[in-house]
Image (cartoon, grey):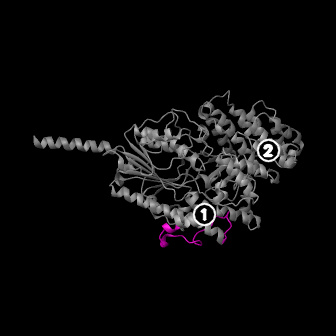
């Protein structure tokens, strides 16, 4: 009887162990501002990333993994909610708009499956009521959070956000700060010398630039070392054999032309999944050094993890389940987006199939290296502007300071640095037509709410969420609005004529896109329409009026436009003030606005973005130093 009793106990224990192991532990290692080009496992022989490389050697490496955005908070908004920013209204960096109460941070659903969920420790979720949202999502979110506080045997989901490759380290903070906080934390044998790597061709290959760009490699090396320490802790706690490990970056490279720009360098991320032996059956790609070109993006993460935990996928999650029994069918293209970053307004929508990246620039009158204070104060950006002024840049390097075309089409397999725009090449006509069509269909299907100016989203958010507003066809006739927006950025007399006609629309957002499109036309094209544009300075919709005033000032030197712009700069609505200062950054004659900009900067209640725009304006004239001490 004793033996039978012991056998029954053993069977119960074994069954309990098997059931427990049906729910894997999951560790996410998230790093900042990094593109695959700078990692050894992605073919960079100059990189020193042995820990990440070993994960890839024993795991699954993705060559077509993309962030849904190109700057931190919008990307993290999609990661935590599983909803794309152009549906939620969260695409503008640190905008703090409310989201529907039924949308939760996805770890909320893991808690319901018995998981202990922790975040160490970055949030930056870009949603309203973020403290309550974060509290609901996590058992623990702090710089002390980790798997170690769970109950015995409880499965865990743990995120560790490592910041050492962030733009602050690689470019923005002063060089002395970088030496203290990055370089001196590396053994001498780990450091990458200034001459020991290949410079991207869109940068001037000078000693000054190499000194700055070496920061990227050394910051990634420090990151790799810290990942090694984290994985060692996992090993010490005897958890490696029951934990699936995800490694990825929150968006692409943080250097100028990468972060904030809607091109491959801003979107594509390094992404590796490592499976322990007991969970290798969950991988549809195989394991141990597998490389897959399957298209994935951040919309897929929430449903994938909820599915792994055994939870039911909420209806609002539209991403794919990447692995396990409920794996979704692979897709043949992704839609990606880039919107305002800090004080730098912008709007780009992109389609990629992994080989080509098609990007539609809706505000191309601003260059890829547009004014964004957090970048302007960096030494590397100032060196680039100095080299531009001294005519030291070749045509490619100079082009990133010039107006963009309305469309980019890059072969991101053969042209990894995106140096050759294929839009005008006849042999790519079919590819271009297909991707244009896909973009149009995706925008209309998703009912992209960010085709409303941020001014309008701010007004809507006082009474309801942008996510829900976008579904109201009567209040948000997207087809009509998108027809106008689709012209924006395209140049020529025929396009300008259509845009002028749209200024008579009863729909204020249609008029906004008509005027925004006119901002990208050249002066010769606009001359026949001078009267209509000047008249629009009195449009009752402020986004139309401020844009009309900027065109009237720059192209026509019209009476009254200067005072109109000064009035908009001082507007109580800070979205309008931000529009005004951004337009003024790209006019030829800034002098009449200097005193007004100085005064606006000193208004106590001005938000960071307006203050930063004012500092960029003054810095562009040499009236304030462009350094970290004068960041805002």
Q: Measured from the top left, where is residue 33 in percent x and y?
A: 56, 55
User: Dot 1 lies on which element?
Assistant: loop
Q: Which residue is mark 2?
A: 565
Query: For the N terminus, which image quadrant?
Result: top left
Question: Number of labelled discs?
Answer: 2
Q: Which residue is mark 1?
A: 174
Residue at x-position 61% and y-position 69%: 211
The foreground one among 623 and 514 is: 623
User: Dot 2 lies on which element?
Assistant: helix
The foreground one among 78 and 590 is: 590
Q: In this rendering, would 97 be left or right of 202?
A: left
Label 2 environment density (alpha carbons within 10 Å; few <14, some 14–19, many ≥20): many
Q: Residue furthest left?
A: 1
Q: Which label's residue is closer to the chain start, 2 or 1?
A: 1
Query: Quarter of the image holding residue 255?
Result: bottom right
Q: Measured from the top left, where is residue 389 in percent x and y?
A: 76, 64
Are discs 2 and 1 less than 8 Å apart at CB?
no
Query: Quarter of the image holding residue 517?
Result: top right
Q: Residue furthest top?
A: 474
Residue bounds of the magenta highlight: 183-206
């Amino acid at each position: 009887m004793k033996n039978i009793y012991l056998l029954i106990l053993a069977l119960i224990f074994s069954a309990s162990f098997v059931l427990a192991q049906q729910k894997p532990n999951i560790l996410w290692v998230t790093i900042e501002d990094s593109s695959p080009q700078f990692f050894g496992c992605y073919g960079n022989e100059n990189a020193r990333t042995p820990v990440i490389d070993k994960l890839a050697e024993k795991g699954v490496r993705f060559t077509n993994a993309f962030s849904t955005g190109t700057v931190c908070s919008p990307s993290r908004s999609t990661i935590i909610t599983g909803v794309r920013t152009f549906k939620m209204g969260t695409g503008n960096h640190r905008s703090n708009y409310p989201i529907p109460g039924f949308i939760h941070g996805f770890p909320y659903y893991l808690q319901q499956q018995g998981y202990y969920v922790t975040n160490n420790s970055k949030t930056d979720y870009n949603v309203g009521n973020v403290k309550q949202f974060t509290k609901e999502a996590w058992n623990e979110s702090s710089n002390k959070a980790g798997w170690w506080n769970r109950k015995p045997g409880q499965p865990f989901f743990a995120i560790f956000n490592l910041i050492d490759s962030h733009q602050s380290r690689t470019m923005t903070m002063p060089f002395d700060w970088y030496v203290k906080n990055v370089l001196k934390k590396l053994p001498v044998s780990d450091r990458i010398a200034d001459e020991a790597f290949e410079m991207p061709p869109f940068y001037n290959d000078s000693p000054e630039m190499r000194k700055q760009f070496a920061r990227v490699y050394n910051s990634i090396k420090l990151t790799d070392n810290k990942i090694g320490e984290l994985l060692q802790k996992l090993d010490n706690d005897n958890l490696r054999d029951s934990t699936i490990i995800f490694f990825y970056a929150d968006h692409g490279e943080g250097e100028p032309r990468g972060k904030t720009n809607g091109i491959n360098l801003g979107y594509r991320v390094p992404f590796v999944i490592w499976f322990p032996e007991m969970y290798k059956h969950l991988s549809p790609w195989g394991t141990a050094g597998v490389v897959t070109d399957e298209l994935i993006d951040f919309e897929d993460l929430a449903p994938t993890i909820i599915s792994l935990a055994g939870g039911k996928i909420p209806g609002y999650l539209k991403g794919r389940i990447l692995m396990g029994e409920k794996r979704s069918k692979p897709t043949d293209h992704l839609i990606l987006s880039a919107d305002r970053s800090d004080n730098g307004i912008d709007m780009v929508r992109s389609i990629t199939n992994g080989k080509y990246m098609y990007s539609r620039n809706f505000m191309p009158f601003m260059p890829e290296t547009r004014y964004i204070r957090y970048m302007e104060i960096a030494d590397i950006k100032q060196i680039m502007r100095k080299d531009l002024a001294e005519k030291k840049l070749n045509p490619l390097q100079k082009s990133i300071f010039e107006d963009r075309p309305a469309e980019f089409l890059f072969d991101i397999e053969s042209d990894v640095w995106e140096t050759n725009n294929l839009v005008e090449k006849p042999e790519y006509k079919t590819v271009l037509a297909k991707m244009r069509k896909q973009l149009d269909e995706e925008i209309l299907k998703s009912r992209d709410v960010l085709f409303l100016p941020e001014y309008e989203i701010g007004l809507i958010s006082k009474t309801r969420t942008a996510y829900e507003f976008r579904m109201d066809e009567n209040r948000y006739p997207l087809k009509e609005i998108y027809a106008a927006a689709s012209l924006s950025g395209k140049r020529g007399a025929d396009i300008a004529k259509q845009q002028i006609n749209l200024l008579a629309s009863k729909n204020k957002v249609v008029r906004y896109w008509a005027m925004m499109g006119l901002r990208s036309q050249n002066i010769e094209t606009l001359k026949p329409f001078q009267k209509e544009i000047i008249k629009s300075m009195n449009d009752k919709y402020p986004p139309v009026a401020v844009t009309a005033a900027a065109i009237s000032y720059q192209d026509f030197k019209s009476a009254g436009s200067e005072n109109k712009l000064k009035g908009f700069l001082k507007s109580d609505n800070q979205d309008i003030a931000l529009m005004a200062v951004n337009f003024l950054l790209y006019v030829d004659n800034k002098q009449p606005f200097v005193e007004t900009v100085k005064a606006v900067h000193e208004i106590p209640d001005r938000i960071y973005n307006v203050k930063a725009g004012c500092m960029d304006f003054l810095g562009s004239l040499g009236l304030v130093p462009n350094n970290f001490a004068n960041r805002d």
